[in-house]
Amino acid sequence: MKEKIKIGIVGSKFAADFHAFSYARTSGVEIAAVAAIDNLEPFAKKWNIPKTYADYKEMLAREDLDLVSVCAPNFLHHDIAVAAARAGKHVFCEKPLATTTADARDIIATCRTAGVKLFYGEDWCFAPPLKRMIEVIGEGGVGKVLYVKAKECHNGTHSPFAKKKETCGGGCLIHLAIHPIGWVLHLLGQSGNNKVVEVFGKCNGGLRDNYVHQENGGEDFALGVMKFANGEHALIEGNYITVGGMDDKVEVYGTEGNIKADLTFGSCLNVYSRPGYKYVIEKTDNTLGWTKPAVDEFLNLGYVDELAYAVDCVRRNEEPMYGCSGALGLACIEIISAMYQSHETGAVVRGKWG
């Protein structure tokens, strides 16, 4: 069993930052190198990364890495993941796995052929409140699950790549709602038998059809409905029209009870401030008046534990569970594609996903 796991990161912005933060809190890990086209030196200095590369292919060729974190814009995920796999490196890909189902399937096939592990970054599967929720459900605390409602919403992305439909793969549905979709699949479909069999989607059309962000090529509001083979339904929401900070919530309704989680506004701290202070939660406009600041945001959202889990799988040579696997990443893209198809046609799309 390998004691020291050497990490390479591709990217240097938001996702790369929480990956570096999480690796820094994981024992037996060395972030050996980073590759990025901008913000490279400041990022490397911040996290004390010894090797920097302007070209990720050079990093893959020259560095003896165990695991590569793909933290670049969505449209680059496929090419970086495939290159890392062909170089014999295990791959951790941030969401979405790819921008098309064909590219997602190719990543999975390439990793399988290369004999490397593929991890998919659905942090909700590792968020402590949601892990506890699954424990309560597993103990029969709410009876048989009938209906799940889950959302991720905020006031809009700052990434120029996320604002463009062609580089994002869509809008807030693929960029935000992918989190609740992935978690609901983890909750209801991880046995492998309870597939999603019907999908319906409704969203804004992008640009001038958007409510607020008319410069965005993709939608700024989206709803999706999933029906599972065992009869459960899930309502999924993602939008860029929610002001006041990132709003991540989950509600599960069963025959004997219900359970609710507030990932982003559920802090145990309450602060009243006249002058304001540095930081509350992601996407807040100000810190005036009453606020609920995050205590350990990256831990509470699951980032720290998901990356520690991936490192442990590499160290022990174990395959990832469904909630951290390429299979989940592919299912999310397939379902999102079906939701976009449903929006275009106005009809329910039937299939088998998960």
Image: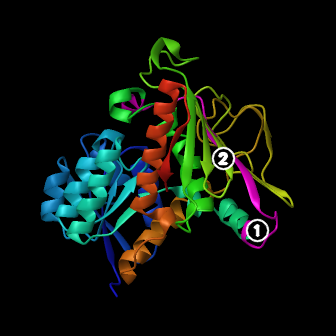
Judge left or right: residue 114 versus residue 140: left
Residue 171 image point, x, y percent:
46, 30
Residue 340 image point, x, y percent:
47, 32
The residue tagged 1 is: 136
**351 inside magenta stretch:** no
Q: Quadrant of the N terminus?
A: bottom left
Q: As rendered, which of 2 and 198 lies closer to the eye?
A: 198
Please give the name of the residue rendered at 69% of the width and 65% of the height, measured from the top-left corner.
Answer: 134
Give the quarter of the image for residue 72: top left
Residue 308, disc:
none
Q: As rendered, which of 157 and 178 lies closer to the eye?
A: 178
Q: Give the range drawn in magenta.
A: 137-162
Judge left or right: residue 295 versus residue 314: right
Q: How far apart, in angstroms, are the residues tagged by discs 1 and 2?
A: 19 Å
Please tell me how many numbered marks the rendered image carries: 2
Q: Which circle, 1 or 2, is nearer the viewer?
A: 2
